[in-house]
Image (cartoon, rainbow, N blue to C red):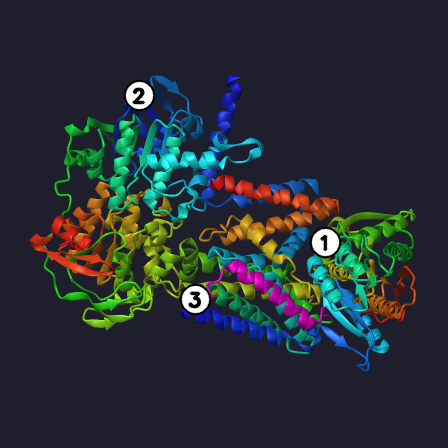
Amino acid sequence: MSTLKATGITKTFSGVTVLHDISLDVPGGKIVALVGENGAGKSTLMNIFAGALRPDSGSILIDGQPQQFHSVSDATNAGIAMIYQELNVFLNLSIAENFLIGNEGAYARSGGLIDRHALREAVMSTLEAVGLRRNPDDLVADLGVGERQLVEIGKALRRKSRFLILDEPTAALTEQETSRLFLILRSLRDQGVSIIYISHRLAEVFELADSVVVLRDGQEVASQSIAETSESELVTQMVGRQITNLYPRIASAPGKVALRLDRVSTAKTHDVSLTVRAGEIVGLGGMMGSGRTEIARAIAGLDPIIAGTLELDGEARHFRSPRAALAAGVAFLTEDRKYDGLVLPFSAQQNLALPTLDTRQRFSWISQHEERAFAQRMRDSLRIKLQSLDQPVERLSGGNQQKVALGKWLERNPKALVLDEPTRGVDVGAKQEIYNLMNDLKRQGKAILMISSDLPELLGMSDRVYIVRDFTIAGELDGHDMTQVEFMRFATGGK
Amino acid sequence: MMKWIDQTKRKTTSARFNLGWMQKYHLGPALGFVIIFVALSITSRSFLTVHNLLNVALQTSVNALLAIGMTFVILTAGIDLSVGSILAFSSAITAGLLIGHVNIVLASVIGLVVGALAGLLNGLFVAYGRLAPFIVTLGTLTLFRGATEIYTGGVPIFNLPEAFSSFGAGALVGIPIPVLVTAVIFALGLLALQRTTHGRRIYAIGGNERAAFLAGIPVKRYLMAVYVICGALAALAGLVLTSRLGSAEPTAGFGYELDAITAVVLGGTSLFGGEGTLWGTIIGALILGVISNGLNLLNVNSFYQDAIKGVIILFAIMLDRKRAS
Amino acid sequence: MKSIKVTSALVALLALSLASCASPTSGNSTTSGSGSSKYTIGFAVSTLNNPFFVAMENGVKSEAAKEGVTVIVDNGNNDPATQLNQVQDLIQQKVNVIILNPTDSQSLSSAVKLANQAKIPVITLDRSVSSGTVATFIASNSVQAGKMAADELVKALGGQGEVIDLQGTVGTSAEADREKGFSDEIATAPGITVVARQTANFDRSTALNVTQNLLQAHPNVKGLFAQNDEMALGALKAIQQAGKSGVAIVGIDGEQEVVNDIQQGLIYADIAQQPTQEGVLGVQSAVKLAKGETVQATVDSPLQLVVKGTSFKGF
């Protein structure tokens, strides 16, 4: 079995040291987890392994032999395969064609023709090895995210990769897909493949990994066997301070009902009834695809309500656009901040100011001075960490991006906030800050409806929880009933 | 050997230092302009004279007006291929009114309104018809050209009143009137885009239309507005051209959309929307104007001119993109 | 649903605006004469986007009316593919003769061959095709036109001075032939120097800019040859706006606007083609062919020198 080793890796970007003297040991047939907050240096380190970046000093050894990677293909040839979070598959091609690309030589016949039979055979056997029951001629676009990931892993195996690096592989997977992936990763490990597994989800790390390495600010703060550590210890190592309470729910003193849905139906959802009171955080949970986001869209004025009533502060409302919903006092934090939450080329200041341009204008004129003052106030109160307010948000970390995406609504002083996956892709430290922010809003008497796929978070932060199944509310939990077991009973429709 | 390596190293670091500085103030296109400008000042004796530079400014004004309008559209991630045809159509209408003895101001205003309405048609299709701007304006490119041919019967409209020509051919304190008009439009456009809520919203729509919509921006209205602005400025460019020529040609503005788009892209504006400045656009238009002027002054063989233009454009874009990457 | 409604409303609006733009001149087929026309002639014109070809069309129509034959006019919009389709349609309609003013001499050869197969005689106007059988080719001689222009310019300058040559779109045969006629002839005048040869793409506004630029570099220019009238008119504007006088302009084509300017002494001379005449000659030949008479293989359409005092209407 082959071993992969890095010693004394240091990397500097324009004067900033992002990796300082990192050593990593990946024994053959083991799964090593790599954890750390965003910006800790995980991606840089992995890119060095993958040959995409070259270290300033230090070296990578395979079976004790020093390696010189000048390009990704050098690393690939040495047996290292990187599976990125954003998958490198061609959606418009079939599974077999995806296998072919970059490996044309293996299936070439004379005259540049493709040996379709050999390709098909190879793909079939690989799909079986990764447990993907699909026809090689299926279009990758028709595959789920989890299946696409298996295609990538299959491609890596086909190239005889001995070292597999996975960057947040479960971020977009359902629970079932996740467990299938784990099954396959374990079986690969047992066949002698070494795996570096990067994840924010500590539960997964404990489920899967043999050992765990913690990075913080480019330094290696811990490298330990999984048996020797605990979840809370890892969190402490990652953030550099102790977090006593992962989900700092505060006692609620809910006021009157701020948001009420009474048998609301849209083109997708039907008969949704729920209430959120002022000064209350209400969870909205359910399996992926159960209709949670669709309910949020109806509240935010994105999908027209065709039956039932929506009341805000006791007044029936009919929002025909997000603009109308916003004017009435409903803010909507969408689940994908890059897709529809932020204007990526805009600076943090411009993003923060966007929904409230009107309130600071004089004859359509933007007062740069006032806008800057407003943005500074937001930056300070939300504790957004950035070099400058003029920095494009695309260069901020996930947590800081999320703070900007959330913060921009606050100046509108909304009565109700719908937060769809408020902590997705956010590291542990920033999660705490977002929770604290939600608590602040709760104290101010805002009605908050939070959607989350992270069950401990949903149950930990909410005062009450609604469970969505088949595009309607399947049940409601509060007090001592708010347990994972009860939740899953409703979510899966079990008895 | 060692020494040589040292020198190259120093060179690259100093170049990198420049990069950030250049990028911050969007100076990539300006650098390209300065290089061309200096090169022409050295190679041609006639280039660096007040008279010739005013001449270049005058010749650039039509494309600059089109490119300013085009910038608004491209900032929203759109494109307007119909500007050349709108220019021709609105010019023909104005010229037709003028030879029908309609008051000059009224005829000009009607021309501008026709341009704005043509832009409105584009905007309606793009914003409310949800059709791709490229396809819509590809259609109206042909539609408005056809309308021009029908209206003019394929014949130039000439014998326009002398007073109308004084707009395009006249000067105020030595500066050609079209240049002054362009400068005013540029200044207004710059202020609108950089300093007003409307400009900010246009950038936001181009940067992320969905996020802009969620932030309560009436996206459709703004999309429509940028095509109206673009159409009206195309008509204004048409007025300038018609008054300079003293006639309205059915073929006027043929292919001008490409010059306008080239100016915008040269100026560093992203075709994907949300990024770019009017400063860049005006520099882009000046680069094109200076190239044409320089090639004439140097009496470069006609056969080589297009190829040389192409190389210079690619070079200028490379200069900018190197900085941006 | 809503967006579909909006879209269909927009489509209706577009259709309406198209319809309202359509004026009587857009009719495609003209039945001329008494109505009992014996013959049908197809006229495929390269473009009607240029007064020259509009005049040619007028010549065809008026002569057809006189002869009492039906003409189907097809505007190729300067696109060889469009024109090829149009010629095929004319063959389908079994016209007696096709008068072709080709958009492109290469591409339209195949159209001519198709007509040959269908045994429909083809007459080419102004430009011809590179292969296929053409019954007669009617055009003015471009080399000759360039030569005549050079002679006029030498005469205007008294054999002394600097001149500018504004070229047409490079790569066209008109540009090449007019350039050859002009260059060869001007070279025989020792006192004349051509200080600049620059293209202005046969376009008026381009000529305005190019001439402005050239006047910067060559302030002592005394004469200017423009390979077509559109460029001559653009150059005239540039010269006027530069406040210069005494620059003699000679153009080619015979546009009415230039003819007017010549009478006012603004332009020195023009070598007029007679597109109306080409159209007339075309129809005359077509009628002969339809009747089964023989025609000459090439017919030179007359060129006319227009100077101040010449009575010529232009087109």
* Neighbours of disc 3 within 10 Å: few (<14), some (14-19), many (20+): few
Task: Give the side of residue B301 with respect to residue C66, left or right.
Answer: left
Residue B153 in magenta? yes
**x, y percentage for residue A272?**
22, 65
Circle on res. C299: none
Does residue A114 appear in this view? yes
Q: Is residue C106 above or below residue C273?
A: above
- Residue tagged 2: A1
Does residue A217 appear in this view? no
Query: Label 1 to label 3, Cα distance in Å?
Result: 41 Å
Q: Residue furthest bottom?
A: C34
As helix, strand or loop, the secondary structure at mark 1 comes to helix
Secondary structure of the magenta portion, mostly?
Answer: helix
Q: Is disc 1 on the same chain as disc 2?
A: no
- Residue tagged 1: C210
Please state, as top left, top right, bottom left or bottom right, where the C terminus of chain C lies in the image. Answer: bottom right
Residue B174 in magenta? no
The span picked out in magenta is: B129-158
Give amino acid for label 2: Met
- Residue tagged 3: B221
As helix, strand or loop, the secondary structure at mark 3 comes to helix
Q: Give me the chain letter of mark 1.
A: C
